[in-house]
Image (spheres, grey):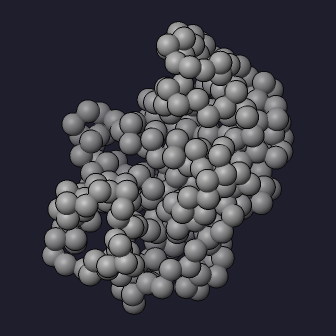
Amino acid sequence: MKITLVGTGRVGSAIAFGLTINPLASELLLLNRSREKAQGDAMDLTHAAALVNSNMKIWAGEIADSKDSDVIVFTASVPFRYPGQTRLQMGQDNMPILREWMPALAKASPNAIIVMVSNPVDALAYETIRLTGFDSTRVIGTGTLVDSIRYRALLSTELQIHAEDIRAYILGEHGDSQFAASSIAMTGGERFYPSDTSRRMFEETKAMGYEVFRLKGHTSYGIAMATITILDSIVYDLRHTLPVSVLVNGYLGVKDVCLSLPAVIGRQGITRVLRPTLSDDEQAAFRHSAEVVKQTLAEMESGC
């Protein structure tokens, strides 16, 4: 198994460190606009790997070295520049980066699965499908997985139930138009009906990424572990159901846009996209998310 990680900024480096502690591949290639930065990370991680029961090769290289990768994790991005900056506002800066890297990466590894981490993740996942010509089942955006994890953590504390036993999803856009699918949230077959408490927790969840940024200047660990959860399900063909950004074509009348829905992830990528029965308000929220992402794509196209 060969994993290529594109972008060794804070998020990319956190993912690489996670993969060093929990080696999922025989080879981890680091690519970065600054080759020296990637080389430094590769050396540092190799030293860390000496204390782990692993013989994973960790090295830095160029796009040509990514040939025949099984998975490509794309984290290359401009940084958040100021508190309150939305993910959508990063789109016009990140689109040229995607267009610079993605076609050559796809040509070098035509059978790879691509995990898109950079923001705005829904728009960039969609553009990745267009740029590569890959089947949409092989392009997975991290989407609202990290938001759903945060939401479950808050519910866990409130309900005194382990977070892994709670089935609660944040769906739609990974951004301000996301929504909690409260009508399908449950544990042990018991539903959690919408309440003032669950609504408050969702609002806390939606603001949490910005709050982490305000406090420490960036986010990295949560999204890194969310990404590794996706990689784990791919590498071991675990078929976990995860809320990730996928191409939507026909669900609730929404077409030709990437948004987060519960999807089954395995060795071939997305093996199934589930179509949950949502409440009327949630259906409207999903359609709204679609319009927001489509508008973002249009603005990104016009600005490039």
In the rendered structure, the answer to whether residue 190 lies left or right of residue 296 reads left
Q: Indicate whether 258 appears above or below 112.
A: below
Residue 64 percent across, percent down from the top left: 80, 26
In the rendered structure, the answer to whether residue 213 lies left or right of residue 135 reads left
Q: Is residue 4 something that shows in the picture?
A: no
In the rendered structure, the answer to whether residue 5 lies left or right of residue 174 reads right
Q: Indicate whether 237 appears above or below 103.
A: below
Q: Indicate whether 246 appears above or below 285.
A: above
Residue 301 percent across, percent down from the top left: 62, 57
Residue 50 percent across, percent down from the top left: 54, 11
Which residue occupies the foreground of this view, 51 or 138?
A: 51
Which residue shows up at 37% across the image and 57% down it? 164
Q: Is residue 145 something that shows in the picture?
A: yes
In the rendered structure, the answer to whether residue 119 lies left or right of residue 150 reads right
Which residue occupies the foreground of this view, 52 or 254?
A: 52
Which residue shows up at 58% across the image and 65% down it? 263
Rendering quarter of residue 62: top right
Rendering quarter of residue 139: bottom right
Which residue occupies the foreground of this view, 284 or 185?
A: 185
Residue 275 percent across, percent down from the top left: 56, 79
